[in-house]
């Protein structure tokens, strides 16, 4: 857009007018009008990740990098990606946002540490005229709606929970002799939960169980605890539960794949034969989880479409940068939201996912 102003207006004007126009443009750039202090024409994206150690988030960041490279060669123009790791600290993230704005980023892509802190970021972005796209950790709706150029790209937490619960229900009903080890008709389970307060933890926990009970199966929760999306923490919890409950555990529901893999680590440690393992289900469909599905250790998972989400972020960012209507670039709901669908994965349909992962 800035380039268009320069090339279409200046050459046709007399010298004096041209100088004034150049001065006005320079002042506009310096005053932060439109938040742009740079004069180069490449799109600059500032991406703040809540934690680079999180498996799913690091996959999403790689997907975004790859898509940016593909887009650069398609349009023959440079796109600069500035990526920061907020290391679980919202104050650190605020500093990173300030630096992105000071460095003239054209669009901010924010994976909040604390989802309740988005209002400040929206206000800072609006003051600079820099659009902001939140992703993965959904801010409070009224914060997103503070400004027309504030967006959220993600996937519905309820949907992932419901699909996971449906996987369990279908398997249980198809082969009760295999899964109902006690033969009492009640599904005894443990729940490995993600970070406390995160929508994906709360809603996956709630909706997975709701899908099972709505399907007419009675459940009994033996234990639940957070393992903060983390494989090692989940393995430690699971070791304790195996000691306490032994083979009473019939199903292990995990809010994500990394924690399901932690449960697998703990079960492998016991040396128990695979045919005696409880049913284990996760969410994300990361590469190691798909391998575990192939090996028969993980009964199933639910694809959290990292590439689809990264693609939506990039399309939205490009549209905003070019001053185009974002609704023309992505499927925008309620003017602010882009939702990507989840998909169930089991051994039956695994081959399709292995090819693309
Ligand atoms: C979830 C994902 C988890 C974790 C979390 C971080 O959507 O399933 O594995 O990455 O986001 O916010």
Image (cartoon, rainbow, N blue to C red):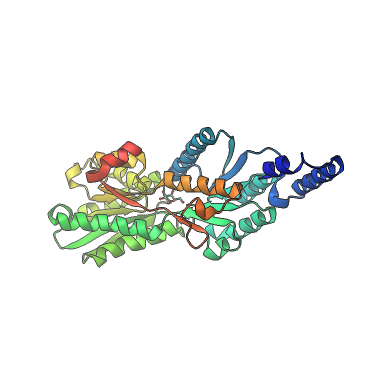
Identified at 61% across, 52% down, the residue is 131
Identified at 17% across, 44% down, the residue is 275
Asked whether, in this view, residue 33 is left or right of residue 115, the answer is: right
Asked whether, in this view, residue 147 is left or right of residue 74, the answer is: right
Q: Where residue 174 sits in the image (x, y, percent)?
A: 15, 55
Residue 112 is at least partly visible in this image: no
* Relative to 222, residue 73 above or below: above
Can you say which quadrant of the picture contains the N terminus?
Answer: top right
Identified at 44% across, 59% down, the residue is 199
Identified at 30% across, 62% down, the residue is 209
Q: How many marks?
A: 0
Can you say which quadrant of the picture contains the C terminus?
Answer: top left
Pick the residue in front: 198 or 35.
35
Residue 76 is at least partly visible in this image: yes
Residue 47, picture quadrant: top right
Asked whether, in this view, residue 278 is left or right of residue 76, the answer is: left
Q: Where residue 249 sits in the image (x, y, percent)?
A: 24, 55
Q: Where residue 15 sits in the image (x, y, percent)?
A: 85, 40
| Extreme residue in the right direction | 16
Pick the residue in front: 172 or 238.
172
Pick the residue in front: 326 or 10.
10
Q: Where residue 337 sits in the image (x, y, percent)?
A: 49, 58
């Amino acid at each position: 857009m800035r380039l268009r102003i320069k090339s279409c207006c200046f050459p046709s004007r007399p010298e004096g007018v041209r100088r004034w126009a150049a001065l006005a443009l320079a002042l506009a750039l310096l005053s932060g009008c439109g938040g742009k202090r740079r004069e180069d024409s490449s799109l600059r994206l500032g991406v703040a990740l809540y934690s680079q150690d999180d498996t799913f988030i690091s996959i999403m960041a790689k997907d975004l990098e790859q898509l940016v490279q593909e887009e650069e060669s398609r349009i023959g123009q440079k796109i600069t990606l500035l990526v920061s790791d907020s290391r679980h600290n919202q104050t650190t993230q605020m500093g990173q946002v300030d630096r992105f704005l000071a460095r003239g980023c054209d669009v901010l892509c924010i994976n909040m540490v604390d989802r309740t802190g988005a209002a400040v970021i929206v206000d800072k972005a609006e003051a600079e005229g820099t659009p902001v796209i939140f992703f993965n950790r959904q801010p409070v709706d009224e914060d997103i709606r503070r400004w027309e150029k504030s967006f959220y790209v993600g996937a519905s937490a309820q949907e992932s929970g419901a699909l996971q619960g449906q996987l369990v229900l279908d398997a249980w009903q198809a082969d009760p002799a295999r899964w109902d080890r006690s033969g009492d008709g009640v599904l005894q389970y443990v729940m490995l939960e993600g970070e406390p307060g995160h929508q994906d933890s709360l809603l996956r926990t709630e909706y997975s169980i709701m899908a099972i009970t709505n399907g007419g199966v009675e459940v009994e929760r033996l234990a639940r605890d957070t393992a903060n999306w983390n494989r090692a923490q989940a393995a430690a919890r699971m070791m304790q539960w195996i000691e306490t409950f032994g083979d009473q555990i019939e199903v292990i529901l995990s809010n994500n794949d990394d924690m399901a893999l932690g449960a697998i680590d703990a079960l492998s440690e016991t040396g128990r034969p695979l045919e005696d393992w409880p049913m284990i289900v996760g969410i994300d469909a990361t590469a190691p989880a798909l391998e575990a599905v192939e090996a028969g250790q993980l009964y199933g998972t639910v694809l959290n479409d990292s590439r689809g989400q990264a693609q939506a972020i990039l399309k939205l960012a490009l549209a905003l940068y070019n001053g185009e209507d974002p609704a023309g670039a992505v499927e925008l709901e309620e003017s602010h939201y882009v939702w990507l669908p989840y998909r169930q994965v089991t051994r039956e349909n695994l081959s399709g996912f292995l090819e693309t992962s």
